[in-house]
Image: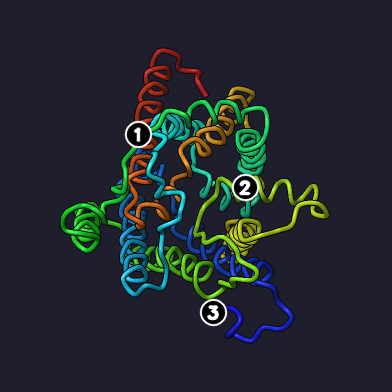
Amino acid sequence: MFEELGFETLTPVTASIIFALIIGVAFGVIGQHTKFCFRRGIVGDASERKSARGVWFTALIAAIIGTQVLVAMDIISFADHRFFVSDVPVLAIALGGLLFGAGMVLTRGCVSRLTVLTGTGNTRALIVLIVFGITAHAALKGILAPIRVWAGSFTIDFDQTVSFAQLPGGASLWASLLVLAALSLIIKSGAKTTHLILAVILGLLVPLSWAGTGFILFDEFDPIAMQSLSFTSPSADLLFWAVASTAIPAGFGVGLMGGVIAGSALASLAKGEFKWQSFETPQQTRRYLAGAMLMGLGGVLAGGCTVGAGLGGIPTLSFAAILALAFITVGAIATRRVLEGGAQRTPSFA
């Protein structure tokens, strides 16, 4: 498809960076305006929990419908995607999900939200993002890689049935059931109509990214990976490209992260919400750094974050993606309860 577009000065990789920048800016603007965050919808303050959940699941519905339409039209295929390996690393997904869920509670934000906050002048989020990227890279290729390899060795062979699409009823039935389940949460959310509309647009960035990298920019002579919204690997990519750009080329992930930060910065400046913020106490610093490391390792083990495995992964109907988000949810709820219990016993907890 890329050759047919007639670009003479762009390679697929360069085009993917520009494409990712556009996607990222849109995500950053909408994410800042709606305060888009899975953590807020699961364990956020009671006053905001339902509305945040409504916004997140509205985006998920749009992502599911858009992605499955592309699959039905044979525009994209997930046959060779990592979400669809027959040997599912269940221990790594479970452990990683629990760690990531715990980490996002400690840092008061999942990685996508912290990326958005970085663009608003929040240096806490920036430092967490840096530590997260270092830890994720260490788990992928560094000193923490043995943990990933060990956890990944415990697998269950699902044979050819690795997604809901391969169950009786097929993709249409199971996608419809997921949409209906999400819709039941949205109806009760009380979220603003404008936020729900923006959530639909944000959710459609998922299938747009799949189509862009897997179809529009596909070039058999210079192939790029088919990918969508994700923040675990891209965070590490951005960090190490920033410090070694002459040795490490940029790609879709670098463009996406840069676009999100730029988009949220533009949105916060336009609305007068840009504000420099930092850590307030040593206790808070320790808590956020611990959370960043837990999320970095957990995101790699689980195969993605709340966006990569959740918003981007669930629309593929992959068992692994749904399992990852389930364990992230369990880890977040359990950690929130532990922290609440500790706060009751120790009023000075921060």
Label 3 packing within 10 angstroms: few (<14), some (14-19), many (20+): few
Q: First in sequence, mark 1 or 3: give its number.
A: 3
* x and y percentages locating residue 60 in the rendered image: 34, 57
Query: SS of the residue at dot 2?
Result: helix
Q: Residue furthest right?
A: 246
Q: Residue furthest left?
A: 169
Q: Which residue is mark 1?
A: 156
* x and y percentages locating residue 211 in the rendered image: 47, 70
Please say if 39 is above or below 154: below
Q: Which residue is mark 2?
A: 235
Q: How is the image coloured?
A: rainbow
Residue pictured at 58% horizontal, 59% vertical = 260
Q: Are marks 2 and 1 in contact (CB under 8 Å)?
A: no
- Judging depth in this view, the residue of 242 and 150 nearest the camera is 150
* x and y percentages locating residue 187 in the rendered image: 21, 57
- Judging depth in this view, the residue of 56 and 136 nearest the camera is 136
Q: Which residue is mark 3?
A: 1
Please say if 348 is above or below 144: above
Q: Nearer the viewer, mark 2 or mark 1?
A: 1
Q: Can the viewer see residue 268?
A: no
Query: SS of the residue at dot 3?
Result: loop
Q: First in sequence, mark 2 or 1: give its number.
A: 1
The amino acid at mark 3 is: Met
The amino acid at mark 2 is: Ser
Residue pictured at 28% horizontal, 48% vertical = 161
Tell me the distance, in whole angstroms, between the alpha carbons under discs 3 and 2.
29 Å
The amino acid at mark 1 is: Ile
Q: First in sequence, mark 3 or 2: give its number.
A: 3
